[in-house]
Image (tube, rainbow, N blue to C red):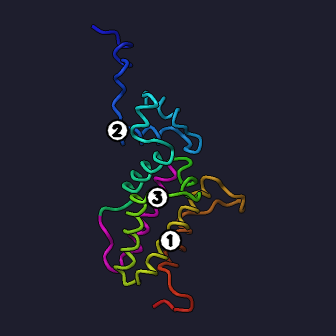
Amino acid sequence: MADARTTRNRPGRPAQLSRERIVDAVLAAGNLDTLTMRELATRLQVSHGALYRWVKNREELFDLLGEVMVDRVLPAEAPRGRSWRPWLGRVAWAMHDQFLAVPGYATHLARPHRHNAHSFGRMRNAVSAAFTEAGVPPELAEQSWYIFITSLVSWLATQENPLELGERAPRFELFLDTLLRGLPAREPGVQRR
């Protein structure tokens, strides 16, 4: 019978990697701002080469994480007609819970960088479609998406890196209610119906 030490880390036989295993290790790592590829490979008990076959750098690592996050926050069903507000509220609360569970993720998203076109494109399309389904012109639906995502991600990043704005912590439900009441975007001077 083989010794457990020799079967666990046999040369040439790296542990099996998968998207889920990599993301689980990233999520358990602590602050994403300080996580290095070397640390991640060590956490996964694989060589750097094995990890680099899946993700070549931190940018690809964040792309992979973004795909999983979008999978987790987008509801399977799309809103119908004017039911976009409760649906978008569910998306926002899911983002709140998922993004803040990964220290550094909202902060990373709030920084200017290239976002994963596939994952955040899916979210943009779903949110914009919710507005157009409710009768919002496509250009204003796109503007509404932009207002929603930049406001929400900025708020979440502020939660990770609190500003000294006063003694009371901002409440997410108040922020979200105010944001959703202001959407969808409309041209200046046009009254709501």
Q: Amino acid at mark 2?
A: Ser
Q: Nearer the viewer, mark 3 or mark 2?
A: 2
CB of mark 1 within 8 Å of CB of mark 2? no
Q: Residue at x 64, y 53 (%)?
A: 161
Furthest-left residue in view?
1
Above or below for 28 versus 5: below
Residues rendered magenta in the picture: 77-101
Above or below for 187 versus 160: below
Q: Nearer the viewer, mark 3 or mark 1?
A: 1
Q: Amino acid at mark 1?
A: Tyr
Q: Which residue is the site of mark 2?
A: 18
Marks 1 and 2, the one that precedes in the sequence: 2
Q: Which mark is residue 95?
A: 3
182 on left or right of 120: right
**165 vs 74, nearest the viewer:** 74
Percent position of residue 190, x then y: 52, 92
Marks 3 and 1, the one that precedes in the sequence: 3
Q: Which residue is the site of mark 1?
A: 146
Percent position of residue 81, x then y: 32, 80
**47 vs 126, nearest the viewer:** 47
Q: Main secondary structure of the magenta part?
A: helix
Q: CA distance from mark 1 to mark 2?
A: 32 Å
Q: CA distance from mark 3 to mark 1?
A: 15 Å
